[in-house]
Image: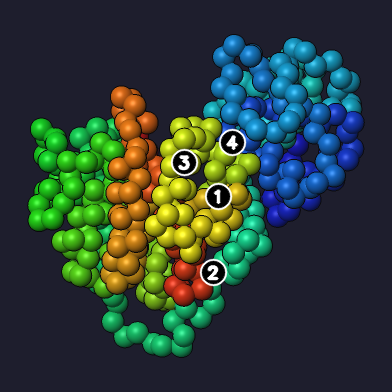
Amino acid sequence: MRMAMDRTDLFGWFKRQSALYRYVYIYGAGFRAKVLTGMLLSETKDICISGIVITDRQSAKIDFCWELPIVELQEIDTPNEETLFLIGTVDAYVKEICRELQKRDYTNYIHVPEKEFQELKHRYAEKQYEAYFGEYLQKNLCKGTVQKNDPVIKIYMVKSEKDRSVKLQARHPNIIPIQGGREISDRKIAELGDNTGRNISQKNRQFNEFTVIYWLWKNAARDSEYIGLCHYRRIFDMDHALDRIKSERPDVVLVEPEVLFPTIETHYCSIHYAEDFLLMKAALRKRYPEYAVFAEKYFSQELFIPYNMMIAKSAVFVEYAEWIFPLLEEIEEKWRPRGHSYEDRALAFLGEWLTGVYFLYHRNRLRLTYSKIQLLEMR
């Protein structure tokens, strides 16, 4: 039977439940199961996980990093009363997995639904952030200053001719659509493009949203008190983000940290070219040696500041751009494309990892805060 969870203390509850069983399995070997396993191993160190279960080795997408045996369900013959399964897949697969377990007379299983999984991940990230980097949400960001007027906030939403269709377009008075790579596109999909004034629009296939960031830096950074960036299908939770800005007046709003196990460097190297990451680290040591030690610390833990999304005070945005573009240009000089449209976006991927380095390095100088995002549903 599916077991009821204590949602206020899932880690502690799972530890208590697992103590009742001789065999404890994680069902699923994809990214979500990897994150869930990593958090459990970190938070409940005395739990003994017997292995990772998949339904079919041929069709399973395995994305795992823990030294645990991966077995098909049909290979397990442990007694039902001694066996517990934690289902770590996305919600869409749960009913089918439950049926497979029931076919084999297994009745003790737990599933963490998506909403609870995200909350669990948020609590874990906040705790780990404070252990690694200090206070997660800095107190008294306004320093007691009362602001009478709301700041002017412009958030530019990056669009591309290759975007998939979303069911409902993001519409908000603070969001301004802008087309990235307009210079190399045959289609106009937004009134504003990144190919006017000073620009690097022609490099969009390698730099992606960074051609828009460059355009904002050179052409629009001083048009508002706060300037931001989001994506056509990922936007800030606008009520949450704007409330933080109006009440706290931070220097920058970033996306809440993502959790990538075992470290954010190994995660990058498992899905992209490891030599590109090494090239990026070498360029960072050469151009900004004072960042090198902190960068290694950031790369060797599991919290990641994702998506190159931010809402920053204009002066802070300019400082960031002045820092990152010389570094990306240095990487570009030695990097070579591989003829694959996805991996040839490497400069954007590397820039995403560097964005976290920059802002967390300055966490004691800048007033940082974090916001949730909204993922728009695709057609």
Quarter containing the C terminus: top left
Amino acid at pointer 2: Leu
Residue 256 visible in the displayed image:
no
Quarter containing the N terminus: top right
Q: Earlier in the sequence, mark 1 or mark 2?
A: 2
Q: Position of residue 9 (x, y in %)?
A: 73, 53
Disc on res. 32 = 4
What is the C-alpha distance between the residues marked 1 and 2? 21 Å
Q: Position of residue 195 (x, y in %)?
A: 12, 48
Amino acid at pointer 3: Phe
Amino acid at pointer 1: Phe
> Image height check: is 109 above or below 114?
above
> Image height check: is 129 above or below 36?
below
**Residues packed near mark 2 inside 10 Å, few (<14), some (14 to 19) or many (20 plus):** some
Label 1 element class: helix
Q: Residue at x 24, y 48 (%)?
A: 211
Q: Residue at x 10, y 56 (%)?
A: 197
Residue 136 visible in the displayed image:
yes
Disc on res. 137 = 2
Residue tagged 1 = 299
Q: Which picture quadrant has residue 297?
A: bottom right
Residue tagged 3 = 277
What is the C-alpha distance between the residues marked 3 and 4? 24 Å
